[in-house]
Image: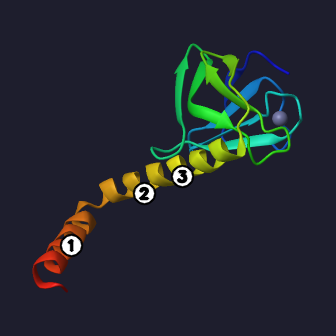
Amino acid sequence: MISTIVLERVKYLPRELEPGILYVSEEYAVAGHLCACGCGNKVITPLAPAEWTLFDRHARPTLRPSIGNWQLSCRSHYLITNGKIQWAGQWSEAQIIAGRKVEQQRREDYYASLNPNHSFLHWLRKLARKLFGL
Ligand SMILES: [Zn+2]
């Protein structure tokens, strides 16, 4: 189990990751690290408005939202804040399902916000349906 993580900027994520390093490729908008529990699994987090956001202060990274490795057997869940690993509670099945829904909603909201015409059309269609039963 690790308790701290440092930021390392790279062009490509290396094939072999070292524990305690958060590799960040700005070019490919992706970050990768080894699961903080020590299980050795790679955790790849896309950096995008609907995915994860990286804040770095003097090489001490903060990543939001939390890292929930419910797809790994360890099911670890933690936050990376100012280069420190903050352990969060293990996820129950219900939380995993809820977490997936929140992620999905976040993505949908983001893509909807990128395309206001689409939501305007959607609104028009809804109005037409209401007024004319179309
Ligand atoms: Zn793990």
Instruction: Using the image as rendered, state which of residue 102 and residue 39 is in the foreground.
Output: 102
| Residue 108: image tag | 2
Q: In which quarter of the image is the N terminus?
A: top right
Of the residues tagged 3 and 2, which is closer to the observer?
Answer: 3
Name the element at disc 2. helix
Tell me which residue sits at (71%, 46%) in the image: 93
Residue 127 visible in the picture: yes
Where is residue 133, by image quadrant?
bottom left
Name the element at disc 3. helix
Tell me which residue sits at (63%, 50%) in the image: 97
Q: Mark 1 points at which residue?
A: 126
Where is residue 54, by image quadrant?
top right
Disc nearer the start of the sequence (3/2): 3
Q: Name the residue under label 3.
A: 101
Above or below residue 74? Residue 110 is below
Residue 66 at x, y = what percent? 61, 32
Above or below residue 125? Residue 99 is above
Instruction: Using the image as rendered, state which of residue 47 and residue 129 is in the foreground.
Output: 129
Answer with left or right where residue 39 lies relative to residue 68: right
Tell me which residue sits at (81%, 45%) in the image: 72
Q: In which quarter of the image is the C terminus?
A: bottom left
Residue 57 at x, y = what percent? 54, 15
Is disc 3's CB within 8 Å of ligand 1?
A: no
Q: What is the three-letter code of the residue carrying label 3?
A: Lys
Give the crowd class for mark 1: few <14, some 14-19, many >=20 residues within 10 Å.
Answer: some
